[in-house]
Amino acid sequence: MSSQDIPEENLPAAQDTSQGAVKLADEQNPFADPGLPPHEPRVQDIDERAAKRSERTVALLFTVSMLATVGFIASYVTIPVDKSVYIWPLGHISALNFALGMTLGLALFCIGAGAVHWARTLMSDHELADERHPIEAAPDVRAKVMDDFRQGAKESVLGRRKLIRNTMFGALALFPLSGVVLLRDLGPLPGTKLRHTLWSRGKLLVNMNTNEPLRPSDLIVGSLTFAKPEGLEEHDHGFQTEIAKAALMLVRIQPDDIKDKRALEWSHEGILAYSKICTHVGCPISLYEQQTHHALCPCHQSTFDLSDGAKVIFGPAGHPLPQLRIGVNDEGYLEALGDFDEPVGPAFWERG
């Protein structure tokens, strides 16, 4: 049915579009601007009790967001990283990841839902039409913007609805703490654990290949053997972490060929124990020249003279290999007489 088929008395009259009325299309102007529909008040506009209910709903959403943020922080601190739970239909998943995702998502959702409900039920919903204007801001435009801002602030009822204002500020202020807590992953600070390994006085030297304690007779002059501390097994949870610091390289040199006095004192019958970890970037050293007593790192060819305190004679390594003082116990097995004399591996910022 076209507009010509509708009785004239049933058609809405043409009105000013700025007042929310409509204009009719005709033959001269078939695409007339229909304008904005008449404004219809909401129940919150005419019933203060309904407005109070909406206010409490918004405040509840902001409060739930705050509680969810607290739950996020509590989950991050209390739930073990390796704990898993069964969640249908997801199956077995990380309890920590599930808790963090749920609480963070709930905190964000409630802030957004609260803001939307506030805007839809309490803020002014009058639709306004404005003509396009040049990009530059003329003085009258700036004045209008400020007037609009003040009018918007007034219509937002932020000053009158203090419960919404206070809970919104609380949710927005508390939520960033989630990101602050995540900074905990940058720590904890290493403390002094980089300076110490599993080696201690009385720890037996165990052959890495046979998993048996070593006796001096097991090493011949010119040989290279790798050892680990007694009690460290490959199936242990922290094996890779500990062996990266405690891996030991044993060489046997004629005592008369040992140039460094302290290296000779810390050896046993010419058996020297040095860290296997290169002091450049931490590669394991595995190449040994019997005639020169030089140990080479296969990664960047740093070369250490094991007969002279494992000093660097070539390559990018910055300092000698740490030495482990060793001896023999009452049963004739090689044992450590303490820990390495300095941190193993590459230099770090606290060295010295």
Image (cartoon, grey):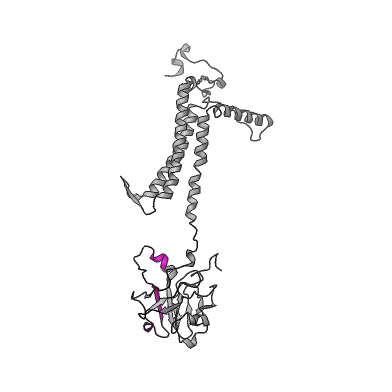
Report which quarter residue 109 is drawn in.
top left
Could you tell me if residue 86 is visible in this image?
yes
| Residue 225 locus on image (x, y percent) | 40, 78
Along the viewing direction, whichever of 261 and 250 lies nearer the viewer: 261
**Residue at x-position 45% and y-position 43%:** 70
Along the viewing direction, whichever of 17 and 262 lies nearer the viewer: 262
The quadrant in which the N terminus is found is: top left
Could you tell me if residue 42 is visible in this image?
no
**Residue at x-position 52% and y-position 82%:** 261
Residue 227 falls within the magenta-colored stretch: yes
- The answer to whether 14 appears left or right of 143 in the picture is left
| Residue 14 locus on image (x, y percent) | 53, 17
Boundaries of the magenta span: 216-242
Q: Is residue 176 above or below residue 157?
A: below
Residue 236 falls within the magenta-colored stretch: yes
**Residue at x-position 44% and y-position 37%:** 64
Q: Is residue 339 above or below residue 123?
A: below
